Image: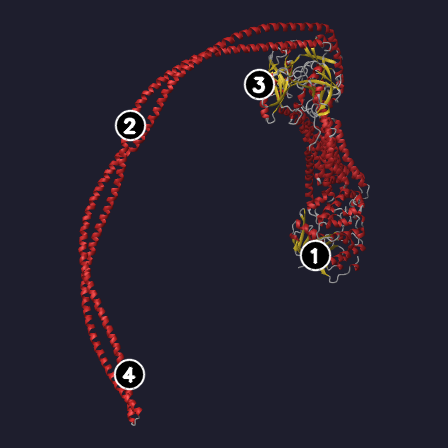
Amino acid sequence: MSYIQFANVSKIYKVGDTEIHALSNVSFDVEQGEICVVVGPSGAGKTTLLNVLGGMDSCSEGQIAVDDRIITDFRKRALMHYRRDDVGFIFQSYNLVPNLTALENLELVANLSNKAVDCMELMHLVGLEKRANLFPSQLSGGEQQRVAIARALVKKPKVLLCDEPTGALDYETGIQILRLIKRASEIMNMTVLIITHNNAISPIADRVITMKSGRISKIELNDTPMPVERIEW
Amino acid sequence: MKKTLFKDTLRSISANRLRFISIIVIVALGISFFIGIKSSSPAMGYSANEYFRINNLLDLRVTSQIPFTDEDIEKIENIRKVDYVVRSKYIDAVVSVGDSTLVDESGTELACRISSLNIEQAKMFTQTGSADDSYVNRVILKDGRYPEKAGECLIDAAAVKKYESLGIGSVIRLSAKDSAVNDALNVQELKIVGTVDSPMYISDERGNTQVGSGALSSFVFVDEDDFKTNEINELFVKINYDDIYDKFSDEYASIVDKIASEIKLISADAMSSNLSYLKIEYNNKIQQKQAEIDAYEASSAVELTNKQKEIDEFKAYVDSEDEILAQKKEQNESEKASLKQTLDSATNRYNTLKSEYEANVKAFESGSSEIKGYTEQKKLYDEIYAKYIEETQKVTELEGEMEIAKADLETKRALYDSIQSKIDSRNAEIKRINNDILSLSGEIDTLRGELSMLENKTIPDLKKDISDLKSKIAALENKGALTDYETALLIGYNTELGRKESQLKSSEGKANDCNSKIASKTNSITEKNNSVNTLKNEIKTEETNLAAVKSSLTAAQTVYDNAQKSYNDAKSACESSEKILENHKAALDKLTSGQTKLLELNKTIENQKKELDSLSITVTKAQVRYSLKARNSGRELQKAQYDLDNAKSRYHTIDSELTELKGKIESQKSALSQDLKKLKNTLNNIDSITWQTTTQQQLAGHISFKKSMDNILSMSNIFPIIFFITAMIACFVIMMKNVEEGRGSIGLLKAFGYSNFTIIGKYSLYSVLAWLGGAFVGGLLGTCVVPSLVYSIYDIVYTVPNVGARFDLKYILIGLGVSFATTMIATFVAVFRELRMYPAALMRPKMVGYNRRSLLERLPDFWGRLPYGIVLLIRTVIRSRKRVAVGSIAIACCTALILSSLGLFNSVTDVSESQYGEDGIFKYDVQFVLNANQNPNESAVLKNVSLNDSVTAAMLISNISMSLSPDSERKVSESVHVVTPSNTEDIASYINLDIVEGSADIANGGVVLSQKIAENLGIFSGDMIYLTDSDDVVHCVKVIGIVKNYIDHYAYISQKTYEEVFFEAPEYKYLVCTLKDYLTDEEISAFAAEYLKTEDVAGATTSQTMSRTADTAINQVMILVALFVLSACLLAMIVMYTTSNVNISERTHEIANIKVIGFSDGEVLLYVIRENIISTAIGIIIGLVSGIFLHNALVNLISVENVMYGNTISLWSFFAAAWIIITVAVLAALPILFKINRVKMAETLKSIE
């Protein structure tokens, strides 16, 4: 059985009388330790897919299994624990708590988890040990995103979900971030899902899923992923 | 404004309805409370003024001890600005209902003011609502009707409520002690036909008087014609004051005071012109009175002596009569005793005999019942006997039959036996023969054995041996030559052969012999067998015979057995019958003996009966003799007793007549001497006599009404303002936040190119709408509801009707203006701040204050070691310090409001307990009002009460109301109870003199004053005070100490000092006593009631009734407290809800963020409301501390002048206040939890790109 399994997943939003099919009948698998890139134009349902997988939203039909647990059956509380222990999120807009320093943002998560990694070590990993006591507003975008990655890694998640992680960043920084994500995935044997509309990222993935209007149009397996440094956009 | 923008504003209102409503409510609360409480006092003033105007209340009341002359009145009327003067008559008197004097709440006699009333005018006013100007102080009929004939009256409606014994239909009697009262009215008894309110008495206070305890308790109106005199002693002056409406104002006071002083001048004139005339008149009056007294004493003495004589004579007669009766009684008794003895002995004898006789009769009866069954028994016995004889005969018959059968049986048996023996002998023979046969066959067998032996062995053997020998011989012989040896051998063989041959021969003989023997033997056996067979045949024939014989034998046996059985049956039957017979015989024998005895007993009984009859006659005779005697003597005695009783009752009548006469003479004398004293007093003080003036503002009720108004006014300077400020702060913050929240859209609008003015307009619209809503609701509540509510609290105390909403435009404008300014300024400040920025910056999230570091962080060692929770807490505080500060202030204000309100409750409830309770100021349990002044050394009542088992101590006290002033000019004064204990040393047992200042040792001269009046008038120990008595004479005395006291004002003074100061002895008309601790409240009431029945006691008050009256007066404060607490709670709740609501919508992004991280709803709530918790905690602490000060200020403001409120807040109030606020905070947090639950992570996080 694959590590992540989507089986006929549909998500329908009802807005007034009209139904919006954000996801319709999506099925795919991702193996453990893989880096999977989901590409597609805006409105293709990528973020919905990520939300449903991350336990932030429910799906209307179908079944999602992560590490042999069917998360579509989870109740609210179980979902909360799933988010807390198994999933790490990275957003385009970083979403750091502005009121807390970089290190404290990590500690916020570390306090919830019982398998937390030492926060300072992680700051080392992301190369921000010297800026650990600064507030988010005092950091650049790339630095903020690195803090966000470190924050996502604090709890050693099984799955790392990244929603346009490089979307707000320049090329250099974006490469930096992607390298960091890839390295973390290798060190921790994490399964990574990266959502992007930037097709240039695809070559670094083990698996590329292309989406279009709520459907999967193509799944490509890449036996020889390209090193991050070599991609460009 | 653009239409779309307008629409946008309306949409944003409806999108967050609750917040909009919150703003409205906050504004409304602030405004309503501010306007409401602020206008309560003016509204009360307006109501009162309207009431006074409609009821044409006097401006000045002028009274005089000497009747006014027309000249005097004319002079007054001529004073400038005096409109007109109305004449009236009044008299003050102590009243009673039935036999008991009424007692007021402080345990003193009820003094009433009886005034004249023009009934026609009053009726007219009640019917039409208007009246002639000359009708002043118009009364309001509350119940019943107006008097229609003499002797009917109207009474104070409040008094009817207060005293159960007063009511429509009850009759009040005026005290007969004062002859002035008798002279004043045509009637002494007044029937109450209606109850009224008078504008002169708007509160419970009625002012002072010269009768009773000095405090006026009630008022009564009678028709003018019921007054005997035409002397006018009371004038009501109406003043022409034009444009001055407010009667509580100083302008009005100055006008009236001026006129009052002018009247005083006239008074001095009038008096001095009358002085010499008056002096002569009074001297004459005194002489007349003295003469009257003398004459009365003389005549009463004669009357008394006559009466005494009469009674003495009668007494002798009664005594002699008494003696005769006693003698008669004795004689009768002895005669009766001897007769009684005779009767008793006869009766005794009769009774013993009778009992004996009855015992015998009883025995006879039981005996005869025993032998009742004799005849039946006998008959039964006879029957049984006959049966028995019959049975015996039958037995004999059966016996014969049995004998015959027996003989037959025996012959048969003999025959049978002989045959049997024959058979037996034959059988024996056969046996013997058979034995022979057996032995013979044995012999044959032996013989055969021998034979076979011989034949088979011996013979063959021999034959063989022979043949052997022969062969051997032959051998030898054939050899021929024989040797010696062989020859010997041959010889031996030959011999041998011979022997053997012989042997063979004998054996063959033997064998033959045996054969023959066997043959013979076999023959004899055959013979024997034959004889056996013959024998057997014989037996057979015999056996056939035997069988025949046996069957006949069996038959015979059966016959015999039957016979025997029937015999045996008959025999046993006969035997049982015999036994029964014997039993019956025994029973019968017993009965026979009983009958004999019974006959003897019967004889005895008859004899006894005869004797009894004769005795009975004897007894009856004795009885008759005795009862005759008894009746006769009883009648005699009764008659004598009746005579005596008659005599005695007549004696008692005369005696009581004497007592009555004595009493009458006594009271008449005291009344006369009282009159005399009064006249003398007046004469002595004639130089200082002036008219008394009382201005409208000086009326007792008006003073306290003014005070209440001032209380509310002062309260309105604290409570509503704090409240209003709190509301406005909250409003300000919410409005600011509201704008900040919409900064994105401001940026957008700006980017579109809208002008700043338009954007401000959009937000102003929102604010104006919110303010309008709040102002409308708040204005309505503040002008209509709150003042009425406040007034309803005072309605309990004052009879002034609530005329309705009357508000001060000033306060309304202030309230509306300040609230409008607050909302608008908040909006403008916020909008302008945003508008300063560039649209791009506005569309980015606000980054204010996030990266601020606390001082603590500059100490990395320390900061690093702090727990994460604390770090988060400090960051929260720093980040939202403004909001925390505002929240803290709002909560502190609410906490302070609640705490001070609860504290007010504590202060007020403590009062009556502290005064009358177990450990209170007044330690005594009951206070009696006595009918007459007592001498402490020989008071019968005191002795009587002291000896009661329930009483631990009792003492006489004097209690007189006087007016106390700190200066000789009496500018300010308050009424005080001057209390004199009859025993100075003992006062501590009855009244707790808890010293605040100075000393309580009144024995050394000076007075000890209660705390409240000292505070009110600014008196300290060592100061001199001026006491004005009922005769308007001022006395000066030094204050030596000030003691704690909670209700009313008291001045304690020793008897010695009293005499020195007032030049007369105190009147001991009150008796206080402490009772045993274990008595219940009911028992105390019962104790008081018991003494109320006695002649000397006119009234009684127990400590519990005193505290009850005090409590009802206090309750009014409670409603105010409740009002304050409730509104403070409401305000706190809304403020907290709204601030956290704003907080939430500002932080939805953050909430979604930490929810994604995996925070549970509870943890998110804690994360979000952390600042609320902090501000609540800080607010509570600040609020509790400032509440103490607020409470202190409040207590000082609301104090009623004669009640001393405690100024401590009890511990539970602190807890309760904190608890209420915490509850409110929790309640306000609940909707937030709901909101957190609804935050959609995905959408929220997506929204920021």
Q: Earlier in the sequence, mark 4 or mark 3?
A: 4
Disc 1: which chain?
A
Give how far apart the Cα atoms at labels 3 and 2 are: 75 Å
Asked if marks 4 and 1 touch (Cβ < 8 Å), the reply is no
Mark 3 residue element: loop
Horizontally, residue B671 falls left or right of residue B1025, namely left
Q: With respect to residue B246, does B280 lie above or below?
A: above
Task: Point out residue B997 in the picture as x, y percentages from the top left corner.
Answer: 73, 24
Q: Amino acid at mark 3?
A: Lys
Asked if marks 3 and 2 touch (Cβ < 8 Å), the reply is no
Q: With respect to residue B1145, does B418 lie above or below?
A: below
Q: Which mark is residue B461?
A: 4
Give how far apart the Cα atoms at labels 3 and 1 are: 109 Å
Q: Amino acid at mark 4?
A: Asp
- The residue identified by callout 3 is B1093
Mark 1 neighbour density, 10 Å: few (under 14) some (14–19) many (20 or more): many
- The residue identified by callout 2 is B602
Task: Point out residue B404 in the picture as x, y percentages from the top left corner.
Answer: 17, 51
Asked if marks 3 and 1 touch (Cβ < 8 Å), the reply is no
Disc 4: which chain?
B
- The residue identified by callout 1 is A216
Viewport quadrant of the N terminus of chain B? top right
Mark 2 residue element: helix
Q: Which quadrant would residue B122 be assigned to in this image?
A: top right
Give how far apart the Cα atoms at labels 4 and 1 are: 144 Å
Q: Earlier in the sequence, mark 2 or mark 4?
A: 4
Q: Nearer the viewer, residue B705 or B831?
A: B705
Q: Amino acid at mark 1?
A: Ile
